[in-house]
Image (tube, rainbow, N blue to C red):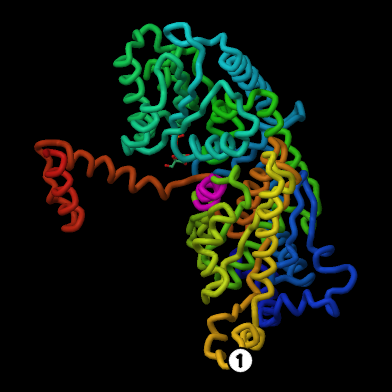
């Protein structure tokens, strides 16, 4: 079976040929948009989230065909296999059971381990939050530094930032990920060793960046005066490789476990989310899990044609594989969701940026789109020009939170107005005729510059408020979108072999930069020249 051989594929191709010349503004014209309106037909609720798909280049027939493609590609079967703990990550021979981390059913897989670890996290978090866990001089902890990278950083960082309005005022949370010493150094300038807790988060506990930062952090503690035998008050570890954590010098009782059946970029629900729990407390952490579980239940039970992750995923396929769009913009109109697009970049691109099909053949169609984004309204004053008038179509997910988490309602009305106005403008555009009128008599040459093609597809995701529950549901929505697309593209979303080659060569290059006896000339001329310049610079 290949994607192009599924009957819905050529049907979608010819449907695309039929409707790609049609205009959203005509579909929305009052005489055409009669009851039930497009907004009524294409807005769906699920798991505490509402999504308005109506400003997309779709008709009822498009959705019908996309759902048929999902059925033929066995999306539901892949979904069920994942929830049941099947070996869906076949190249690493692993299950992908992030959903078990937020399950409520007693018979969901691994519940004993999951619940025991969560209870251990909560007991620890309570002690830190109430001040009974103290540092080497007896002072309470006021700074938490999460050291990790990729999935061991992006998810917790995104959530801690998003739920800042619920954070303990006693604790500041910092994130250090980059091997660039500036990342750690800058944080060290703002904290006090006596009041700092470091969480070393690494599924493998071998990642170069994390281990380098962890060692430098330990050296800093001792230089600041923390006795070796008191380091255990300042270091905890999170890993699926607890032996390595203990070897690093972290006390056994300070090790929190995750498991190989949780993928790094799907792991914020596990002990990897310890910084979240410390910041917002165990109850709010449970709220996050509860919201994600609600979306899980929706994904499992809702019919495919009303299933939010299925619709979101299939819409991505529509633009990527039929319109040829290369990227998708995620534009949260929410400062709190500042790090969402960075998080989604790893989630979507590390998961589905693949060319190998499950049967070992190569795909002959595009897979993951480039995901990028910035919060609105900032983006409007930076790159939205291109979205409106550039020749490239970029589908957009607008994310709006209806009730603000701050007491400045005047700002919020403006924020929401901008979000909704952008999607309206992108949909409507401005014809040349309309632009001529705007330009005014005698200034017709300006009209081209004042015209907008419109017909630009956008999806609006609405959250009632930014709560742990709605945030959990939003994240799970995107996690499942990834699975839906991976099923259609027939790829494995749970491995990441593509990051290996750079890691292997990185070690060789590092030795060639730092080892006195190394021969930097053994690489291609470009790499050798760069190494030689770095060697000279480091000698200065
Ligand atoms: O290099 C990619 C990656 O393996 C990601 O998949 C992962 O989230 C990140 O590195 C960090 O890995 P670890 O948690 O094992 O340190």
Mark 1 Cα within 10 Å, few/some/many (few <14, many 20+)?
A: few
Whether residue 419 can be seen here: yes
Whether residue 201 sits left or right of residue 284 in the image: it is: left
Specify whether 228 is left or right of 64.
left
Question: The N terminus is located in which quarter?
Answer: bottom right
Q: Quadrant of the C terminus?
A: top left
Q: Secondary structure at mark 1?
A: loop
Q: Residue at x 85, y 68 (%)?
A: 37
Which residue is most to the right? Answer: 35
| 95 vs 38, nearest the viewer | 38
Residue 187 position within the rendered picture, expressed as x and y whole percent measured from the top left: 40, 30
Q: Residue at x 73, y 33 (%)?
A: 290
Residue 128 in the image, given as x and y percentages of width and height: 56, 15
**What residue does disc 1 label?**
441
User: Does 184 sit left or right of 105 as displayed?
Assistant: left
Residue 276 x, y percent position in the rendering: 58, 29
Q: Nearer the viewer, residue 1 or 24?
A: 24
Along the line of sight, the residue nearer the viewer: 520 or 30: 30
Indicate yes or no whether the magenta region holds residue 344. Answer: yes
Q: Quadrant of residue 484?
A: bottom right
The answer to whether residue 37 is above or below residue 152 is below
Reply above or below: 51 against 384: above
Residue 185: image location, x then y, percent? 34, 31
Q: Is residue 214 magenta?
A: no
The answer to whether the residue bearing label 1 lies less than 8 angstroms from the nearest atom of ligand 1 is no
Point out the residue furthest to the left here: 517
Q: Is residue 262 visible?
A: no
The image quarter in which residue 494 lies: top right
Image quarter of residue 248: top left
- The magenta segment: 339-349
Which residue: 70% across, 49% down? 410
Main secondary-structure element of the magenta-colored stretch: helix
């Amino acid at each position: 079976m290949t994607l192009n051989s599924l009957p819905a594929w050529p049907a979608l191709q010819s449907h695309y040929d039929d409707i790609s010349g049609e205009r959203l503004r005509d579909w929305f014209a009052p005489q055409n948009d009669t009851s039930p309106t497009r907004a009524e037909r294409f807005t769906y609720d699920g798991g505490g989230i509402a999504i308005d798909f109506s400003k997309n280049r779709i008709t009822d027939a498009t959705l019908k065909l996309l759902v048929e493609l999902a059925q033929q590609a066995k999306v539901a079967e892949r979904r069920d296999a994942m929830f049941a703990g099947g070996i869906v990550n076949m190249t690493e021979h692993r299950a992908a059971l992030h959903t078990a981390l937020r399950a409520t059913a007693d018979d969901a897989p691994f519940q004993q381990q999951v619940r025991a670890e969560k209870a251990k996290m909560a007991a620890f978090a309570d002690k830190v939050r109430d001040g009974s866990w103290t540092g080497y001089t007896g002072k309470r902890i006021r700074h938490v530094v999460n050291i990790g990278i990729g999935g061991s950083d992006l998810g917790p960082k995104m959530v801690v930032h998003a739920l800042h309005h619920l954070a303990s005022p006693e604790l500041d949370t910092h994130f250090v990920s980059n091997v660039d010493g500036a990342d750690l150094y800058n944080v060290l300038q703002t904290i006090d060793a006596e009041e700092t807790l470091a969480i070393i988060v690494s599924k493998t506990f071998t990642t170069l960046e994390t281990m380098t930062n962890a060692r430098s952090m330990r050296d800093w503690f001792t230089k600041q005066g923390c006795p070796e035998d008191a380091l255990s008050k300042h270091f905890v570890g999170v890993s699926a490789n607890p032996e390595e954590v203990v070897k690093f010098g972290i006390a056994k009782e300070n090790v929190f476990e995750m498991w190989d059946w949780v993928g790094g970029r799907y792991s914020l629900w596990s002990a990897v989310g310890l910084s979240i729990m410390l910041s917002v407390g165990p109850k709010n952490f449970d709220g996050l899990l509860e919201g994600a579980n609600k979306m899980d239940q929706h994904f499992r039970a809702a019919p495919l044609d009303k299933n939010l992750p299925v619709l979101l995923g299939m819409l991505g396929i529509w633009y990527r594989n039929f319109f040829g769009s290369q990227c998708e913009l995620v534009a949260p109109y929410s400062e709190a969701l500042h790090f969402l697009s960075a998080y989604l970049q790893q989630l979507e691109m590390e998961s589905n940026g693949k060319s190998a099909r499950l049967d070992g053949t190569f795909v002959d169609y595009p897979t993951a789109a480039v995901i990028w984004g910035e919060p609105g309204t900032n983006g409007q004053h930076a790159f939205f020009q291109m979205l409106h008038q550039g020749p490239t179509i970029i589908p957009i997910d607008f994310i709006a939170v209806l009730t603000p988490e701050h007491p400045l309602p005047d700002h919020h009305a403006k924020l929401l107005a901008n979000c909704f106005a952008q999607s309206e403008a992108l949909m409507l555009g401005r014809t040349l005729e309309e632009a001529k009128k705007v330009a005014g008599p005698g200034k017709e040459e300006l009209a081209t510059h004042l015209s907008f093609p419109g017909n630009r597809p956008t999806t609006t995701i609405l959250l009632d408020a930014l709560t742990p529950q709605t945030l959990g549901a939003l994240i799970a929505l995107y996690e499942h979108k990834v699975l839906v697309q991976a099923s259609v593209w027939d790829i494995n979303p749970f491995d990441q072999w593509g990051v290996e080659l750079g890691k292997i060569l990185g070690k060789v290059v590092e030795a060639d930069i730092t080892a006195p006896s190394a021969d930097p000339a053994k690489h291609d001329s470009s790499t050798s020249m760069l190494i030689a310049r770095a060697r000279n610079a480091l000698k200065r």
